[in-house]
Amino acid sequence: MDLLEVENLSVSFYRPEGEIEALKKVSFSLREGEILAVMGETGCGKSVLCKSILKLLPDIAKIKTGHIIVRGEEITDYTERQMRELRGSFFSMVFQNPMTALNPCMSVGEQIAEAVRLRQPGLSGKERQQRVAELMHLVGLDHPGERARQYPYQLSGGMAQRCVIAIALAAQPSVLFADEATTALDVTVQAQILDLFLELREKTGMSIVLVTHNPGVAARAADRVALMKNGELTGIGDVEEIFEEIIHRQNFI
Amino acid sequence: MRKLYIGRILYNIGKFALRVIVLSVLVFTISRLAPGDPLYAYYGERVEKMSVAQQEQARERLGLRKPLFTQYARWLQGAFHGDFGISYQYKTDVKEVIAARIGNTLILGGLGFLLIFVLALLLGLFCAWREDRAADRIICRIGTVTSCVPEFWLALLLLLVFAVWLDWLPGSGAYSIGKEGDVADRAVHLVLPLTVVVLGHLWYYAFQVRNRLLEEVRADYVLLARMKGLSGKQVLYRHCLRGALPSYLSMMAVALPHILGGTYVVETVFSYPGIGTLAYESARYQDYNLLMVVSLLTGTMVIFCNMLAGIISGRIDPRMRIHSLTGGGEVRGC
Ligand SMILES: Nc1ncnc2c1ncn2[C@@H]1O[C@H](COP(=O)(O)OP(=O)(O)OP(=O)(O)O)[C@@H](O)[C@H]1O
Ligand SMILES: [Mg+2]
């Protein structure tokens, strides 16, 4: 049984101007401990795909058809309350724009601590602070004590991105959606974060959906690659297979 | 750093003093340029029976025949020594006239302000939480209606229903005669005026809170907060409220003098002995000295609260600090 199965998922946005079909009959499955790269040009529906699985889409978006199945259990019709149990523990997500993903009025330490508290309510205040420092260290944030007191405006894009990743990891998820998690970072840091993902996968067996524009990132970290275009999933397969196909197609044209 | 800090405090105090002085000049000049005769305040109808010579004499005695500038200089000199002159109408020291009533206004306006402050926040939170659902819509409708009803009309209506028809509550005064110190008696007298003060302002502020919160709810960071597993309600008061609070506090700082000073309609309808009625009378009867002090009290409070609002939004909103950081770079230590 796969960890996560998505079958025929269609999602539309209902705007005053009309219906926008963001996802059209998308099907794929994610295995335990797998890293699946999702690639495709901008606007093809990668972010919508992640958010619709987590049910974090705005009210104007509706799942029209399809099934989302977690460990054999259908969660498509889960209520908000049931989804809350899954978010922050089974699922976690790194959002695309780190500068706006953090609450500007809350210190980053507090924001990470909140995620820790929700996932591990039993920890004492001191243990929680330790865990926060540990997470910050994990994602490569130096001077955790000092850093924790800073507000998002005091951080660079890369630092903010690492905070968002720390928050996502606080959940100790089984499935992590990383929506261009490394795009804001420079190449060396990008490599560090990818190594971290690979390491966590080894240690915890977490699966990762890695949304990226960068074929290098996909080739380096992913087991399989899914290609998207205009809301459709056009192909999914092993890294070599897909890249060969892309090269082949390009040569063909 | 330390020096800079003290310098800024001095600068603010200077700015404050300057504004108060300018205000006093303005009120002084305008009140004296306005048509009407202050002698009426002092002598009432008797003025009409006085001869021209007598009238001139009376003016001379009250110091009203000197050039405006001299009059102002004299007033200012007295004011620095704590002497604000006498009220023409009450024939006693202005300070005494005000002292006898300011407590009543502070109780009415102050309690009104506190109630509005708390209720607007709660109501705004509730409406934002139930955005566009039945409860929110109903409250929005009712709120719009109440804030459109003029205060005096609402006051008269309540007076008629609860004091005249039902006879449940007293309709005038601040206390029953002879029961000045009785807290329960005062409380009963406050119910109607307080209700009008609160209803008159509540929805305006609650609506601002609601809309500010809804702005926050649309922000990106809400997704991350929900991803952690927080419910909509928790996101609202743990995250969004924090973003809305600085602007709420500075809005309420500006609202403070507005609410405190805006009680005069209510005071008039309920014959409540406060500053509001004094302000009205003193302007109407050219009771210059009284008018000066009443206007300066209110004005000083407005100036002070506006400065306070500026300081609040600059200090407690981390987002505001961005600007001062790139501009002056002297924020961290303070
Ligand atoms: N709030 C919205 N309202 C209406 N349509 C939307 C909304 N959000 C997304 N869409 C639609 O969904 C499509 C897919 O958007 P999505 O954000 O998933 O793209 P993406 O693949 O993540 O692109 P990028 O690489 O730029 O992040 C968009 O082309 C747009 O038409
Ligand atoms: Mg995207």
Image (cartoon, rainbow, N blue to C red):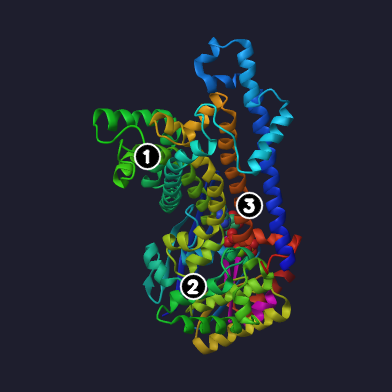
* Residue wearing tag 1: B195
* Residue wearing tag 3: B310
Of helix, strand and loop, which one carries label 1?
helix
| Residue at 63%, 24% in the rendered image | B61
Q: Are marks 2 and 1 in contact (CB under 8 Å)?
A: no
Looking at the image, can residue B240 be seen? yes
Position above or below: B223 against B178: below
Of helix, strand and loop, which one carries label 3?
helix
Q: Nearer the viewer, residue A252 or A79?
A: A79
Q: Earlier in the sequence, mark 3 or mark 1?
A: 1
Residue B269 percent coordinates (x, y): 40, 29
Amino acid at dot 1: Thr
What is the C-alpha distance between the residues marked 3 and 2?
31 Å
Subunit bearing disc 3:
B
Subunit bearing disc 2:
A
* Residue wearing tag 2: A114
Magenta region: which residues?
A214-236
Does mark 1's beta carbon lie closer than 8 Å to ligand 1?
no
